[in-house]
Amino acid sequence: MNEATRFLGLDVHAETIAVALAEPGRGEVRSLGIIPNELTAVRKLIQKLGKKNLRACYEAGPTGFALYWQLAELGIECEVIAPTLIPKKPGDRIKTDRRDALKLARCFRAGDLTAVWVPDQAHEALRDLVRAREAAKYDQHRARQRLSKFLLRTAKRPPSGTPWTIKYVEWIRALRYEHVAQEATRIDYLAEVDHASERILRLEKAIDDAVKQASPTVQAVIDGLQALRGVGKLSATTMAVEIGSFSRFTTAKQLMAYCGVVPSEQSSGNSRRQGAITKTGNAHVRRVLFESAWACRHRPNLGAKLKERQRTLSATTNEIALKAQHRLHRRYLALTARGKPSPKVLGAVGRELLGFIWAVAVQIEQEHAAAAKSKKLAA
């Protein structure tokens, strides 16, 4: 790294940014005060410091990547840092914005920080939409829970069958309570369930429209992941937007560690002890991954819907998907036969499924990268 590089540490909050600067080499690390979290203030700071040999960093957090994009437009190289991987002294009990900025600048200069992958604005917009649909699904679950517990408290027993089917909802609509207050409660709870369902349908349509506007590579990855059994369109879209570029992981094990599906470990000397999965990284990916892994308990089969999804895909992608079906089903049967509990079986199968997801996505990304390179050379 160039010895003349200056390192800017930014402790970012909703209204303010604490600023610190580490001079080149072993130079001074000093605080530059606190500025408003506004584009004009950031621009003035960069003009004051100068763009030459200046690199900036700040922690990933609730303020998102807006500051990163602002600095990129100003021509400043910036990195967004993983907060949990910032070195911390065990005896340090004082935490302030000024100290945090100084620490970021100092550690950034020393090379002790780990950067996260930053999507472009279009990718981040699609990710926000997918997460909005996930939040709507959670709200629907809560609304249904409130209504079902209200029915339980009032001794209203539903007809036999699966809850929340069309027949079940029609039964709730036909109910009538003697007391006005209870009838008003039923109507309100049912209205919330209907509202949540309409919201989910609206967001799913918006996701379909947004995917059509995404880059060709992202669209191809979403289509390719659906060749795997148990991975539907929403699951594939969630994985694609949350992980971003699969090629940034050189091996499938790196992606598994990133998603927190590898065993935790406490080893010392000759003893080796492994525990539950780490659950670090992206929880959205883990959720859809384990949902998809449930399909692996069924024997390998190519149904009509799966065949339709694979029809336009390459032979390599379909070959990987078929191999995944056989391997993961054997893995499920073997672990179940050993008496492993379902959560552990699901964790192990989901981890291997993620390896096949990585293989499919990387193969597609490499094909698109090679095609783009050929097109550029031909032009």
Image (cartoon, grey):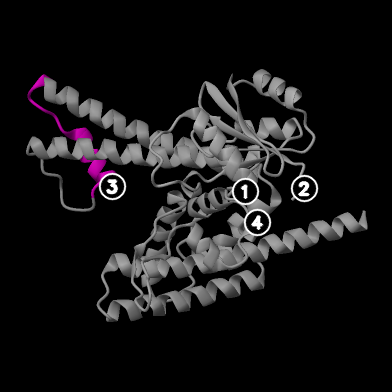
Mark 3, secondary structure of its residue? loop
Spatial separation of the CA atoms under disc 4 and disc 3: 34 Å
Mark 2 = which residue? 2
Mark 4 = which residue? 220
Does the CB distance between marks 2 and 4 fall below 8 Å? no
Point 21% across, 36% down: residue? 146
Specify the label residue 110 is tagged with.
Answer: 1
Please indicate whether residue 132 sits to the left or right of residue 144 in the image: right
Mark 3: few, some, or many residues within 10 Å (few <14, many ≥20)? Answer: few
Mark 4, secondary structure of its residue? helix
Mark 1, secondary structure of its residue? helix
Pointer 3 or 2: first along the chain? 2
Query: Disc 1 marks which amino acid?
Result: Ala
**Residue 235 in view here:** yes
Point 12% across, 20% down: residue? 180
Pointer 2 or 4: first along the chain? 2
Q: Is residue 295 above or below residue 13?
A: below
Please indicate whether residue 332 sits to the left or right of residue 358 in the image: left
Pointer 4 or 3: first along the chain? 3
Residue nearest the observer in this picture, 374 or 145: 374
Query: Disc 4 marks which amino acid?
Result: Ala
In the image, the segment drawn in magenta is 163-180
Point 71% across, 20% down: residue? 44
Spatial separation of the CA atoms under disc 3 and disc 2: 64 Å
Q: Nearer the viewer, mark 3 or mark 1?
A: 1
